[in-house]
Image (cartoon, rainbow, N blue to C red):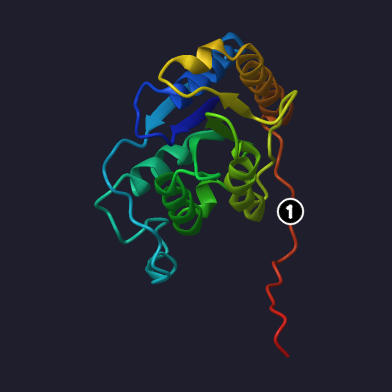
């Protein structure tokens, strides 16, 4: 089993990376492989609602000049996903939101039904709002949200300070334990057979 972790911070070794590393280390003790993908500092396009990914039917976004399709492809062979992000103005990093929205829309088949967790890292406030924003897209793809003993939040401002958040680090380890439990409990079990989706709006 393998969990893909996305570091949604442009700082490669910052506090978000520390939080995800704590999770990865705990998952390793549970016998689960991990890979941390760095979102980096290069631009990630936002979705322009062109619909070409649906017309082409190849689970790929037509924009191939950033990391979107590569990360989606990694998710094809992964059993679960964890997305970590710093908190900017009470929201996740805009780059990671663009990535998540395009991946789920163009390659939703690689994500659907797989356990997922968001992790928010902040200096002081806005973490719960950012965490809710991170988790909301996954609920549209029947992805079970993995929780912990507290909201999946770690505190720290300067690089490395997250390691001093004893409760936050413990929360990350508990998150990893819950993720491992869910993966092992559902291993080799068939997914639910859902009804055909009924989409509607409220304009009459």
Q: Quadrant of the C terminus?
A: bottom right
Among the 4 quarters of the image, the one containing residue 128: top right
Label 1, secondary structure: give it: loop
- Kindly give the residue lying farthest to the bottom in the view shown: 204
Residue 163 lies, in percent from the top left, at 52, 12
Frontmost residue, 95 versus 67: 95
Figure check: 1 above or below 45:
above
Q: Using the rendered image of the protein, determine whether residue 86 is visible from the camera's viewpoint.
A: yes
Figure check: 163 above or below 81:
above
Q: Is residue 116 left or right of residue 109?
A: right
Residue 66 lies, in percent from the top left, at 28, 48
Q: Is residue 31 left or right of residue 77?
A: right
Frontmost residue, 121 versus 20: 121
Q: Which residue is mark 1?
A: 193
Q: Using the rendered image of the protein, determine whether residue 33 is visible from the camera's viewpoint.
A: no
Residue at left offset 69%, top offset 77% = 200
Among the 4 quarters of the image, the one containing residue 173: top right
Local packing at callout 1 (Cα closer than 10 Å; few below 14, some 14-19, many 20+) is few
Figure check: 196 above or below 160:
below
Residue 24 lies, in percent from the top left, at 52, 18
């Amino acid at each position: 089993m393998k969990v893909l972790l996305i570091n949604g911070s442009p700082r490669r070794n910052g506090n978000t990376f520390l939080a995800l590393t704590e999770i990865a280390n705990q998952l390793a003790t549970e016998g689960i492989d991990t890979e941390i993908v760095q979102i980096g500092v290069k631009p990630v396009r936002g979705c322009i609602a062109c619909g070409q990914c649906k017309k082409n039917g190849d689970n790929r976004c037509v924009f191939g000049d950033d990391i979107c399709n590569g990360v989606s492809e990694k998710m094809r062979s992964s059993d679960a996903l964890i997305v970590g992000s710093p908190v900017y103005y009470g929201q996740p990093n805009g780059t990671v939101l663009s990535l998540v929205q395009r991946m789920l829309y163009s390659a939703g088949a690689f994500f659907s039904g797989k356990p997922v967790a968001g992790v928010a890292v902040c200096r002081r406030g806005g973490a719960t709002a950012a965490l809710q924003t991170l988790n909301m897209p996954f609920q549209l793809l029947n992805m079970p949200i993995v929780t912990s003993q507290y909201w999946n939040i770690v505190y720290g401002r300067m690089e490395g300070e997250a390691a001093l958040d004893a409760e936050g680090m413990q929360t990350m380890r508990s998150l990893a334990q819950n993720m491992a439990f869910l993966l092992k409990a559902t291993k080799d079990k068939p997914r639910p057979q859902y009804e055909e989706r009924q989409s509607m709006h409220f304009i009459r």
